[in-house]
Amino acid sequence: MQPAIPMVEIRRGDRLESQHCGHAVICDARGEIVAAWGDPELVIWPRSSCKMLQALPLVESGAADGLDDARLALACASHQGAAMHTEAVAGWLAEMELEESDLRCGSHEPHDRAARDALIRAGHAPGQVHNNCSGKHTGFLALARRLGGGPEYIEIDHPVQRAVRTTFEELTQTEGLGHAIDGCSAPNFATTLHGLARAMAAFATARPDGGVRAAAAARLVDAMARHPALVAGEGRACTELMRAAGGRAAFKTGAEGVYIAILPDLGFGVAVKIADGATRAAEAALAALLVRLEVLERDDPAVRARLGAVLRNWRGREVGEIRAAAGFA
Amino acid sequence: MQPAIPMVEIRRGDRLESQHCGHAVICDARGEIVAAWGDPELVIWPRSSCKMLQALPLVESGAADGLDDARLALACASHQGAAMHTEAVAGWLAEMELEESDLRCGSHEPHDRAARDALIRAGHAPGQVHNNCSGKHTGFLALARRLGGGPEYIEIDHPVQRAVRTTFEELTQTEGLGHAIDGCSAPNFATTLHGLARAMAAFATARPDGGVRAAAAARLVDAMARHPALVAGEGRACTELMRAAGGRAAFKTGAEGVYIAILPDLGFGVAVKIADGATRAAEAALAALLVRLEVLERDDPAVRARLGAVLRNWRGREVGEIRAAAGFA
């Protein structure tokens, strides 16, 4: 087991203030490691970084036939509960003649400032549609309609989760590493960082004419890349980085410092895990890898906001910088 | 230089999900190290953990003569902008015939939910009184009244900051390590973790009859310990841990994973720095050290909320645990 290596530094004044260590893997079309930092065989919880894997049975089963790209993007999203997200989820539920109460993701305050303030001004509590995973859960409900099973579609032995597990194990080529319960109550299956990157390489190399699974995977990547704002939201790293990539790549964050990239032009999959779980570091580390791979330029505003960014205080004064650690990417 | 050591683990299901490494020092009355983890000579930015050091010239100069304990607690606070905090700061400013615009801390949304929601419902932007440092800055203004100097009391060569620097260097017994600009625009002086713990031991051993400086230091510790809710706010670690200690100790958090403890019963000072800057880990590590030192019991709810805490998801399901790493404290 290799130790995590320094990846991201927070500097204040002329000194290092904090440092994030982590692990990363770049995989090619055959699932072989092109480059790795830290321990590629580290077993991780991929958290929300694997939402496109959780959405794959929805498409592969035919349950998504006729669904538009926007809904597929939402099924892969960790959205911030802006009106564009919640209205689309509510519309999808209504079309299936389902209620918000059919969701099992729980409620939390939306990260979108306007949506949050509107709820507070109206005196309304946030609902399950505001949960960042509500699109994924609506996708689970659509799949449950096809596969059957009871209303508790998040239980580990429900047909929906059995289908997710099978897909997950086939694409990561890891199995039996157990599962945990995610923030949204869905099972989250463990894999290695290599396994996660391998699955993302499979998405990166999937072509519409490559068979049922490949066509489904290609459709999800295309949906994410075409709808970057639905996958996260204004100002968020996934959205801004996908926009910068101009629809040629898909990126997805996961809680506790996980990040993936799907890079069709290269046929590569990338997986990052920051050991301490920090999102700011996962974003910076992914940006550094995208620059290394020449997917994005170092001076792209979406990159600069996460890597080499000047940190400002409450009065707008420059106080520090977030940057890649020496020797990483 | 010793590497940071594993201090705090986040577990999900039956696996380690994230891990925080850090440094800690416990110092005795003579400033000698009683116990240390990681590198005691690590140079750090103490951030808000040193607010009682920044408030010491206010008291020592006599500028705080006649000020009540509540205001002294606010001068040492990183408060969450609840009504109890902002009203007290506004009252103190008014008594000095000063305006909110005399502050130089900048504005941010209050962390207190009720105060935040009230602002949003009223359509008001947060003001400088809501800044978590507004009490410290009001203390600076009170000191400036005594020491003179212009309105820019946060400039490094202003009499207020020159007094803070002298006090800081005398108590930490470190000097010349530079300064940076803090989130609130005040200078933050660098010291070693040992230096920070040494200064806290000086506070811990200060007695009212020990001379001007000792009396001033004892008065600040007493003010913090008597007003735990003013130092942070309901639900916050500093407040809950100080309440649990029953007024016999003072604790203070700082940004980027810093935490200090002042332990008068033992005559000890404690300083913690989490290498990656995570607050959750600094809270857990400090709680672990307080249990080790028998200041608090492991089963105290204020401890259990930070160490050994069950992590729950948006639907209240148990998903993991935050706990001390094996071999730490």
Image: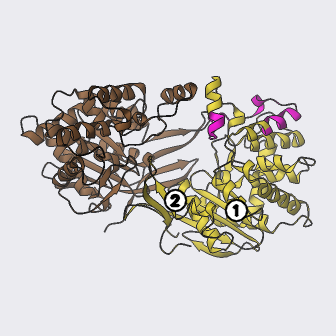
Chain colours: A yellow, B brown
The numbered mark 1 sits on a residue in which chain?
Answer: A
**Viewer-nearest of labels 2 and 1?**
1
Percent across and percent down for residue B279 are 43, 47
> Magenta span has A98?
yes
State whether residue B199 is above or below residue A99: below
Type of the residue with mark 2: Ala
Q: Which mark is residue A130?
A: none
State whether residue B92 is above or below residue A146: above
Give the residue furthest to the top. Answer: A123
User: Seen in the image, is A135 located left or right of residue B57?
Assistant: right
Percent across and percent down for residue A67 are 89, 46
> For the residues tagged 2 and 1, is the chain the same?
yes
Q: Which mark is residue A244?
A: 1
Can you see residue B143? yes
SS class, disc 1: helix
User: Seen in the image, is B233 located left or right of residue A51?
Assistant: left
Task: Identify the residue position indicated by label 2 in the image.
Answer: A275
Type of the residue with mark 1: Ala
User: Seen in the image, is B51 located left or right of residue A89?
Assistant: left
The numbered mark 2 sits on a residue in which chain?
Answer: A
Percent across and percent down for residue A261 are 69, 63
Can you see residue A41? no
Which stretch is magenta? A88-116
